[in-house]
Image: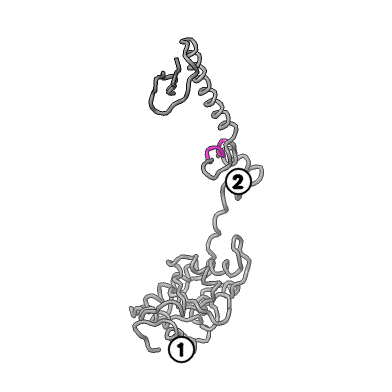
Amino acid sequence: VCLRMSLYGREAMAFFDKLKEADAGNGKCVDCGANSPLWASLSYGTYFCLECSGVHRNLGVHISFVRSLNMDSWSEQQQQRMTCGGNTAFRQYLRQCGMPEELQSGGGQFAGCESQAEGAIRQKYNTRSAAAYRAWLAERSRGEGGAPAPPIFPYEPPPPPPPPTGCNGGAGGGAAGAGVRGASGCGSSSAGRMMQGFGSAPAGNDGEEGLEALMASLGSGLGTARSALASAKIGAPTLLGPQLVDGRRADGWLLAASL
Protein backbone atom coordinates (compact mmCIF):
# COMPACT_ATOMS: atom_id res chain seq x y z
CA VAL A 1 0.00 0.00 0.00
CA CYS A 2 1.37 3.41 -1.01
CA LEU A 3 1.64 5.83 1.90
CA ARG A 4 1.13 9.59 1.57
CA MET A 5 1.94 12.54 3.82
CA SER A 6 -1.64 12.89 5.04
CA LEU A 7 -4.99 11.36 4.16
CA TYR A 8 -8.50 12.56 4.86
CA GLY A 9 -12.05 11.80 3.74
CA ARG A 10 -12.31 9.91 0.45
CA GLU A 11 -8.56 9.44 0.14
CA ALA A 12 -8.44 7.93 3.62
CA MET A 13 -11.34 5.59 2.84
CA ALA A 14 -9.61 4.47 -0.37
CA PHE A 15 -6.50 3.66 1.69
CA PHE A 16 -8.49 1.59 4.19
CA ASP A 17 -10.35 -0.19 1.39
CA LYS A 18 -7.00 -1.44 0.11
CA LEU A 19 -6.11 -2.69 3.60
CA LYS A 20 -9.47 -4.48 3.72
CA GLU A 21 -8.66 -6.20 0.43
CA ALA A 22 -5.50 -7.56 2.05
CA ASP A 23 -7.32 -8.54 5.26
CA ALA A 24 -11.01 -9.33 4.90
CA GLY A 25 -11.31 -9.33 8.70
CA ASN A 26 -11.06 -5.53 8.64
CA GLY A 27 -14.56 -5.44 7.16
CA LYS A 28 -16.11 -6.48 10.50
CA CYS A 29 -15.87 -5.01 13.99
CA VAL A 30 -13.01 -6.73 15.79
CA ASP A 31 -15.01 -6.77 19.04
CA CYS A 32 -18.62 -7.60 18.13
CA GLY A 33 -18.57 -8.60 14.45
CA ALA A 34 -20.71 -5.73 13.11
CA ASN A 35 -20.28 -5.02 9.40
CA SER A 36 -18.43 -2.07 7.85
CA PRO A 37 -16.71 -0.54 10.88
CA LEU A 38 -15.79 3.13 10.53
CA TRP A 39 -13.60 3.52 13.62
CA ALA A 40 -10.12 2.27 14.39
CA SER A 41 -7.63 1.90 17.21
CA LEU A 42 -4.10 3.04 16.40
CA SER A 43 -2.93 1.11 19.43
CA TYR A 44 -3.75 -2.28 17.83
CA GLY A 45 -4.27 -1.45 14.16
CA THR A 46 -7.83 -2.75 14.41
CA TYR A 47 -11.28 -1.63 13.29
CA PHE A 48 -14.58 -1.49 15.19
CA CYS A 49 -18.12 -0.13 15.05
CA LEU A 50 -19.54 3.05 16.54
CA GLU A 51 -20.88 1.38 19.70
CA CYS A 52 -17.59 -0.33 20.49
CA SER A 53 -15.65 2.86 19.74
CA GLY A 54 -17.39 4.54 22.67
CA VAL A 55 -16.18 1.80 25.03
CA HIS A 56 -12.66 2.09 23.61
CA ARG A 57 -12.66 5.83 24.32
CA ASN A 58 -13.61 5.16 27.92
CA LEU A 59 -10.61 2.84 28.30
CA GLY A 60 -8.29 5.84 27.91
CA VAL A 61 -5.80 6.72 25.19
CA HIS A 62 -3.05 4.86 27.05
CA ILE A 63 -4.93 1.63 26.27
CA SER A 64 -6.73 2.41 23.01
CA PHE A 65 -6.24 5.50 20.83
CA VAL A 66 -9.41 5.87 18.77
CA ARG A 67 -9.77 7.60 15.40
CA SER A 68 -12.45 7.85 12.73
CA LEU A 69 -11.66 6.42 9.31
CA ASN A 70 -13.35 9.21 7.36
CA MET A 71 -13.57 12.16 9.79
CA ASP A 72 -9.96 12.29 11.02
CA SER A 73 -6.78 12.97 9.08
CA TRP A 74 -4.18 10.20 8.97
CA SER A 75 -0.47 10.97 8.98
CA GLU A 76 2.10 8.82 7.22
CA GLN A 77 3.21 7.31 10.54
CA GLN A 78 -0.39 6.45 11.44
CA GLN A 79 -0.92 4.87 8.01
CA GLN A 80 2.17 2.74 8.59
CA ARG A 81 0.82 1.55 11.92
CA MET A 82 -2.52 0.52 10.44
CA THR A 83 -0.70 -1.26 7.60
CA CYS A 84 1.26 -3.32 10.14
CA GLY A 85 -1.91 -4.18 12.07
CA GLY A 86 -5.22 -5.69 11.07
CA ASN A 87 -8.15 -7.41 12.74
CA THR A 88 -7.17 -10.92 11.72
CA ALA A 89 -3.63 -10.71 13.12
CA PHE A 90 -4.87 -9.29 16.42
CA ARG A 91 -7.58 -11.93 16.85
CA GLN A 92 -5.16 -14.74 16.02
CA TYR A 93 -2.68 -13.48 18.59
CA LEU A 94 -5.33 -13.31 21.32
CA ARG A 95 -6.45 -16.81 20.43
CA GLN A 96 -2.88 -18.05 20.86
CA CYS A 97 -2.88 -16.45 24.32
CA GLY A 98 -5.98 -18.43 25.25
CA MET A 99 -8.42 -15.52 25.11
CA PRO A 100 -11.97 -16.95 25.50
CA GLU A 101 -13.98 -16.88 22.29
CA GLU A 102 -16.88 -15.13 24.03
CA LEU A 103 -14.58 -12.16 24.62
CA GLN A 104 -13.50 -12.21 21.00
CA SER A 105 -17.13 -11.95 19.86
CA GLY A 106 -18.39 -9.54 22.52
CA GLY A 107 -20.42 -12.09 24.48
CA GLY A 108 -20.59 -13.19 28.11
CA GLN A 109 -22.08 -11.74 31.27
CA PHE A 110 -20.22 -9.05 33.18
CA ALA A 111 -21.37 -7.33 36.37
CA GLY A 112 -21.46 -3.56 36.40
CA CYS A 113 -21.40 -3.16 32.59
CA GLU A 114 -24.19 -1.68 30.50
CA SER A 115 -23.80 -4.26 27.72
CA GLN A 116 -22.07 -7.54 26.91
CA ALA A 117 -19.83 -5.74 24.42
CA GLU A 118 -18.66 -3.30 27.06
CA GLY A 119 -17.78 -6.06 29.51
CA ALA A 120 -15.97 -8.09 26.87
CA ILE A 121 -13.94 -5.12 25.66
CA ARG A 122 -12.88 -4.11 29.15
CA GLN A 123 -11.72 -7.63 29.97
CA LYS A 124 -10.00 -8.11 26.62
CA TYR A 125 -7.90 -4.96 26.58
CA ASN A 126 -6.99 -4.76 30.27
CA THR A 127 -4.70 -7.78 29.97
CA ARG A 128 -0.98 -8.41 29.61
CA SER A 129 -1.70 -9.95 26.22
CA ALA A 130 -3.21 -6.76 24.83
CA ALA A 131 -0.43 -4.65 26.36
CA ALA A 132 2.24 -6.86 24.75
CA TYR A 133 0.60 -6.63 21.33
CA ARG A 134 0.25 -2.86 21.66
CA ALA A 135 3.96 -2.43 22.45
CA TRP A 136 5.04 -4.83 19.70
CA LEU A 137 2.94 -3.08 17.04
CA ALA A 138 4.37 0.32 18.00
CA GLU A 139 7.95 -0.96 17.59
CA ARG A 140 7.18 -2.69 14.32
CA SER A 141 5.48 0.36 12.78
CA ARG A 142 8.52 2.49 13.66
CA GLY A 143 10.82 0.03 11.92
CA GLU A 144 12.75 -0.77 15.08
CA GLY A 145 12.97 -4.45 14.29
CA GLY A 146 12.58 -6.70 17.30
CA ALA A 147 10.65 -9.96 17.45
CA PRO A 148 8.68 -10.98 14.34
CA ALA A 149 5.68 -11.64 16.56
CA PRO A 150 4.55 -10.37 19.96
CA PRO A 151 5.34 -12.50 23.03
CA ILE A 152 2.62 -14.86 24.20
CA PHE A 153 1.08 -14.14 27.59
CA PRO A 154 -1.53 -16.67 28.76
CA TYR A 155 -4.88 -15.02 29.29
CA GLU A 156 -5.62 -13.97 32.86
CA PRO A 157 -8.88 -12.15 33.57
CA PRO A 158 -8.31 -8.73 35.13
CA PRO A 159 -9.32 -8.30 38.78
CA PRO A 160 -12.96 -7.30 39.31
CA PRO A 161 -13.65 -3.63 40.07
CA PRO A 162 -14.02 -2.74 43.76
CA PRO A 163 -17.60 -2.77 45.09
CA PRO A 164 -19.30 0.63 45.34
CA THR A 165 -19.08 2.29 48.71
CA GLY A 166 -21.01 5.08 50.41
CA CYS A 167 -24.53 5.64 51.57
CA ASN A 168 -26.40 4.05 48.69
CA GLY A 169 -24.50 0.89 47.77
CA GLY A 170 -21.90 -1.75 48.55
CA ALA A 171 -21.03 -2.23 52.17
CA GLY A 172 -23.29 0.63 53.09
CA GLY A 173 -26.49 -1.25 52.27
CA GLY A 174 -28.81 -3.10 54.62
CA ALA A 175 -28.74 -3.09 58.41
CA ALA A 176 -24.95 -3.04 58.52
CA GLY A 177 -24.99 -0.10 56.14
CA ALA A 178 -27.31 1.77 58.47
CA GLY A 179 -24.69 1.55 61.19
CA VAL A 180 -21.98 2.74 58.78
CA ARG A 181 -24.15 5.63 57.69
CA GLY A 182 -24.83 6.61 61.28
CA ALA A 183 -21.16 6.51 62.21
CA SER A 184 -20.02 8.48 59.17
CA GLY A 185 -22.84 10.98 59.21
CA CYS A 186 -24.30 9.85 55.87
CA GLY A 187 -28.02 10.30 55.87
CA SER A 188 -28.06 12.00 59.31
CA SER A 189 -29.85 15.27 59.98
CA SER A 190 -26.64 17.05 60.99
CA ALA A 191 -24.94 16.05 57.74
CA GLY A 192 -27.97 17.20 55.80
CA ARG A 193 -27.86 20.62 57.43
CA MET A 194 -24.15 20.95 56.73
CA MET A 195 -24.75 20.28 53.04
CA GLN A 196 -27.52 22.87 52.69
CA GLY A 197 -26.88 25.91 50.53
CA PHE A 198 -28.14 27.55 47.38
CA GLY A 199 -30.47 25.15 45.63
CA SER A 200 -30.65 22.82 48.63
CA ALA A 201 -33.70 21.93 50.68
CA PRO A 202 -35.01 24.71 52.98
CA ALA A 203 -33.42 25.09 56.40
CA GLY A 204 -34.70 22.97 59.24
CA ASN A 205 -35.84 23.97 62.74
CA ASP A 206 -32.42 25.33 63.68
CA GLY A 207 -32.65 28.00 61.00
CA GLU A 208 -36.18 28.98 62.01
CA GLU A 209 -35.21 29.30 65.68
CA GLY A 210 -32.24 31.50 64.77
CA LEU A 211 -34.44 33.81 62.72
CA GLU A 212 -36.98 34.13 65.52
CA ALA A 213 -34.20 34.98 67.99
CA LEU A 214 -32.88 37.70 65.67
CA MET A 215 -36.33 39.27 65.24
CA ALA A 216 -36.92 39.17 69.00
CA SER A 217 -33.61 40.96 69.60
CA LEU A 218 -34.48 43.70 67.12
CA GLY A 219 -37.92 44.15 68.67
CA SER A 220 -36.39 44.40 72.13
CA GLY A 221 -33.97 47.07 70.97
CA LEU A 222 -36.69 49.20 69.42
CA GLY A 223 -38.84 48.81 72.53
CA THR A 224 -35.98 50.11 74.66
CA ALA A 225 -35.63 53.12 72.38
CA ARG A 226 -39.33 53.92 72.62
CA SER A 227 -39.23 53.73 76.43
CA ALA A 228 -36.24 56.09 76.58
CA LEU A 229 -37.89 58.62 74.30
CA ALA A 230 -41.19 58.46 76.20
CA SER A 231 -39.50 59.12 79.55
CA ALA A 232 -37.78 62.16 78.03
CA LYS A 233 -41.16 63.42 76.76
CA ILE A 234 -40.09 63.01 73.17
CA GLY A 235 -42.49 61.96 70.43
CA ALA A 236 -42.55 58.56 68.77
CA PRO A 237 -39.31 57.67 66.99
CA THR A 238 -39.06 57.53 63.23
CA LEU A 239 -36.50 55.29 61.50
CA LEU A 240 -34.15 57.29 59.29
CA GLY A 241 -31.26 56.53 56.98
CA PRO A 242 -27.54 56.67 57.69
CA GLN A 243 -27.53 60.26 59.05
CA LEU A 244 -28.97 61.60 62.33
CA VAL A 245 -31.46 64.47 61.93
CA ASP A 246 -32.52 66.09 65.19
CA GLY A 247 -32.60 62.71 66.83
CA ARG A 248 -30.89 60.23 69.04
CA ARG A 249 -29.09 56.96 68.40
CA ALA A 250 -30.53 53.86 70.08
CA ASP A 251 -29.23 50.27 69.66
CA GLY A 252 -27.41 51.15 66.48
CA TRP A 253 -30.53 52.60 64.76
CA LEU A 254 -30.91 56.28 63.85
CA LEU A 255 -34.12 57.77 65.25
CA ALA A 256 -35.65 61.20 64.68
CA ALA A 257 -37.50 62.75 67.61
CA SER A 258 -40.18 65.42 67.66
CA LEU A 259 -40.06 67.55 70.83
Looking at the picture, tell me which residue is in the foreground, 187 or 22.
187
> Residue 157 at x, y = what percent?
54, 65
Magenta residue span: 190-194
From the image, tell me which residue sits under label 2: 172
Could one spot residue 180 in this view of the protein?
Answer: no
Q: Work out whether 170 lies above or below 141.
A: above
Q: Is residue 200 magenta?
A: no
> Residue 139 at x, y = what percent?
37, 76
> Residue 244 at x, y = what percent?
39, 23
Q: Secondary structure at mark 1?
A: helix
Is mark 1 in CB contact (under 8 Å) with mark 2? no
From the image, tell me which residue sits under label 1: 18
Q: Quadrant of the N terminus?
A: bottom left
Q: Main secondary structure of the magenta part?
A: helix
Q: Residues within 10 Å of mark 2 (few under 14, many from 20)?
A: some
**Mark 2: which amino acid?**
Gly
Quarter of the figure with residue 33: bottom right
Q: Residues within 10 Å of mark 1 (few under 14, many from 20)?
A: few
